[in-house]
Amino acid sequence: MRRLVAAGARLVALVVLGASSAADMELSGVFQEIVKPECHFINGTDRVKFVKRFIYNREQYVHFDSDVGLYMGDTPYGNQVARYWNSDPEWMEYRRDAVDRHCRHNYELSTLFLVERRVPPSVSISL
């Protein structure tokens, strides 16, 4: 049973990575893509900035900045992606609304247990 599960997992990995299922070789690397949304709050919700970063193998290739209101490429490939995403007005309107929909909404939900919570600081020193 363990062999069957391992073989199935290997086949899925090969198909996902685009390798031939007939190839009997070890996978040569790990590929990582990260999408990282960030909300920057200045003075509560008076001034909010939304940034969404797209990172592939530790290199940011494109990002969205709500202050600019557009995707901006950080690499040649990222420039192509940014042009494509910026060309869709409906998608861009949805992305620009993320400041209210994502940041301000989540700020209101978490204010009670994160922002207004006051705990006196304590320090302990030990050898």
Image: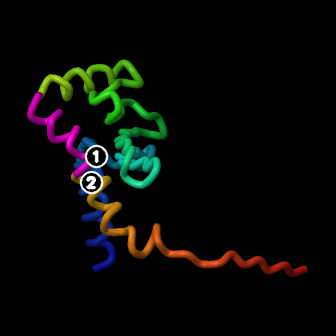
* Tag 2 and tag 1, C-beta contact below 8 Å: yes
In the picture, the disc for residue 99 is 1
Q: Secondary structure at mark 1?
A: helix
Image: 19 above or below 90: below
Residue 84 at x, y = what percent? 19, 24
- Asked if residue 97 is among those painted magenta in the image, a careful observer would answer yes
The amino acid type of the residue labelled 1 equals Val
What residue is rendered at 24% in x and 50% in y?
Answer: 100
Tell me, what colour scheme is on the image? Answer: rainbow
Q: Secondary structure at mark 2?
A: helix
Residue 35 at x, y = what percent? 35, 46
- Residue at the extreme right of the image, as rendered: 127
The alpha-carbon separation of the residues under discs 2 and 1 comes to 6 Å
In the picture, the disc for residue 102 is 2
Main SS, magenta residues? helix
| Residue interval drawn in magenta | 89-100
Between 58 and 94, which is closer to the camera in this rendering? 94
The amino acid type of the residue labelled 2 equals His
Q: How busy is the neighbourhood of tag 2: few (under 14 within 10 Å), some, or many (20 plus)? A: some
